[in-house]
Image (spheres, rainbow, N blue to C red):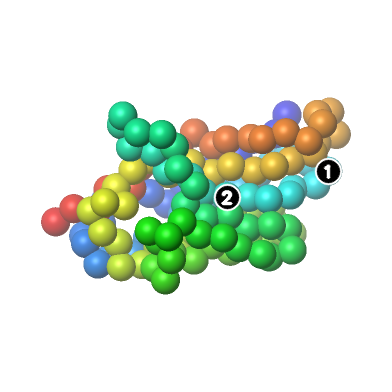
Amino acid sequence: QVQVVESGGGLVQPGGSLRLSCVASGRILRVYTMGWYRQVPGKQRELVAGITSGGSTNYADSVKGRFTISRDNAKNTVYLQMNSLKPEDTAVYYCNADITSWTTLRSDYWGQGTQVTVSS
């Protein structure tokens, strides 16, 4: 079975930084695109940043220049470095990974989410 697990959330003051990590584990054959999404109560989940296995990235306009997504393919891990955080970045952040495993065709996997709160 495949698992996707996030870590690194927490409480930070405006202007501060946090780094999120996400590891995909299990009987994985290949990991394609990995990404970070976020959701606040009452709103749809939105894409924050994505990265392909080749390293191509895309970002939501609201985080461009402040957030950086990266990945370590050997470790099936994706990171999100968040700088200059704003109160409006407060949300539950979810990791998503597009994976083919030994037992499952190419599918989307989601982590359980990690809370990021930006507040003074």
Secondary structure at badge 2 equals strand
Give the residue pinned by disc 1.
29
The answer to whether residue 6 shows anywhere in this view is no
Q: Position of residue 79 (x, y in %)?
A: 54, 58
Q: Examine the rendered structure and indicate whether residue 40 appears above or below residue 88.
A: above
17 w.r.t. 117: above or below: below
Q: Taking 1 as reference, is 55 above or below it?
A: below
Q: Which mark lies nearer to you, 2 or 1?
A: 2
Label 2 to label 1: alpha-carbon separation: 18 Å
Q: Residue sitting at 81 percent across and 29 percent down?
A: 104
Total number of numbered labels?
2
Mark 2 Cα-neighbour bin, 10 Å: few <14, some 14–19, many ≥20: many
| 57 sits to left or right of 73 | left
- Residue 109, relative to residue 88: is it above or below? above
**Residue found at x 42% / y 52%:** 8
- Based on the displayed image, in which of its 4 quarters is residue 46 positioned? top left
Location of residue 56 in the rendering, given as x and y in whole percent from the top left corner: 66, 64
Q: Name the kind of residue labelled 1 in the image.
A: Leu
Residue at the far front in the pictured view: 61
Residue labelled with disc 2:
35
Q: Position of residue 11 (x, y in %)?
A: 26, 51
| Rendered image quadrant of residue 82 | bottom left
Q: Give, as a three-letter code, the residue at label 2.
A: Gly
